[in-house]
C-alpha cells in the first residue's frame, strides 16, 4: 500500500504555476526603447496608436529629440499622454538620421490613458 501511494505521488504531475501578467501601465510618463544605431541618428519619433480590437490608428506623433543612452544601452525619456483621450494604446518608435527614417519598432506593451494621476510604470 505504501509503495502504491509513493508511486502515485511520483507519477502525479505538479501543478503548473504561471506568473501573473505584468500590470498594464496607466498614464505612463516614461518610454524605454533600444536603438542599435544611436550614434548615427539625429532624433527619434514616437507614434501613439489607439488599440481597438486588432485595429491600430495613429493618434499622435511626437518628436523625442535624441535622448542619451543609459548605461544599460537603453534609451529612456519622459512622455506626456495626458492630451490623448481615455482608451488603450501602444507606441512605436522610429529613428531619424537627416532625411532617412527607419522602419517603426515593434509595438510597445499596451498602456491605458485613464482618469487620474500618472503611474510610475513606463512603456517598453
Image (cartoon, rainbow, N blue to C red):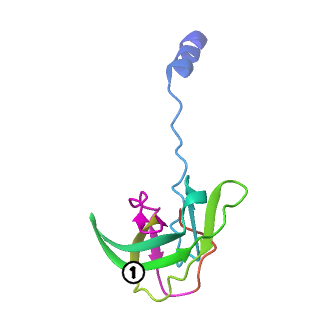
The tally of labels here is 1
Give the prevailing secondary structure in the magenta stretch. loop
Left or right of 70 on screen, residue 17: left
Between 32 and 114, the one lying in front of the other is 32
Q: Secondary structure at mark 1?
A: strand
Residue 5 rendering spot, x and y as whole percentages: 56, 17
Task: Identify residue for label 1.
Answer: 60
Near-viewer residue (70 or 16): 70
Q: Is residue 1 above or below residue 68?
A: above
Quadrant of the drawing holding the N terminus: top right
Q: Is residue 112 above or below residue 69?
A: below
Task: Provide the residue span drawn in magenta.
Answer: 95-116
Residue 34 seen by the camera: no
Mark 1 surroundings: few (<14), some (14-19) or many (≥20) residues within 10 A:
some
Res 110 quadrant in image = bottom left
Q: Where residue 118 appears, x then y in whole percent? A: 59, 81
Q: Position of residue 35 (x, y in %)?
A: 55, 57
Task: Based on the picture, tell me whether residue 112 belongs to the magenta stretch.
Answer: yes
In the rendered image of this protein, does residue 59 appear above or below residue 9? below
- Outermost residue on the front side: it is 98
Q: Residue at x 50, y 82 (%)?
A: 81
Quadrant of res 92: bottom left
- Res. 31 in view: yes
**Magenta stretch containing residue 66, yes or no?**
no
Residue drawn 63% across and 70% down? 67
Q: Which residue is at the front of the view, 6 or 117?
A: 117
Image point 39% across, 86% down: which residue? 85
Q: Residue at x 51, y 36 (%)?
A: 15
Query: To which quarter of the image does residue 54 belong?
Result: bottom left
Q: Position of residue 14 (x, y in %)?
A: 53, 31
Amino acid at each position: 500500500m505504501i509503495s502504491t501511494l509513493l508511486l502515485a505521488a511520483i507519477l502525479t504531475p505538479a501543478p503548473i504555476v504561471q506568473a501573473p501578467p505584468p500590470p498594464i501601465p496607466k498614464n505612463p510618463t516614461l518610454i524605454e526603447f533600444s536603438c542599435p544605431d544611436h550614434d548615427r541618428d539625429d532624433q527619434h519619433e514616437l507614434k501613439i496608436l489607439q488599440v481597438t480590437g486588432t485595429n491600430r490608428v495613429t493618434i499622435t506623433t511626437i518628436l523625442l529629440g535624441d535622448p542619451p543612452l543609459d548605461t544599460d544601452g537603453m534609451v529612456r525619456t519622459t512622455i506626456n499622454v495626458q492630451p490623448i483621450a481615455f482608451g488603450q494604446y501602444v507606441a512605436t518608435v522610429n529613428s531619424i538620421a537627416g532625411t532617412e527614417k527607419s522602419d517603426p519598432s515593434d509595438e510597445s506593451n499596451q498602456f491605458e490613458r485613464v482618469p487620474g494621476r500618472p503611474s510610475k510604470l513606463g512603456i517598453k
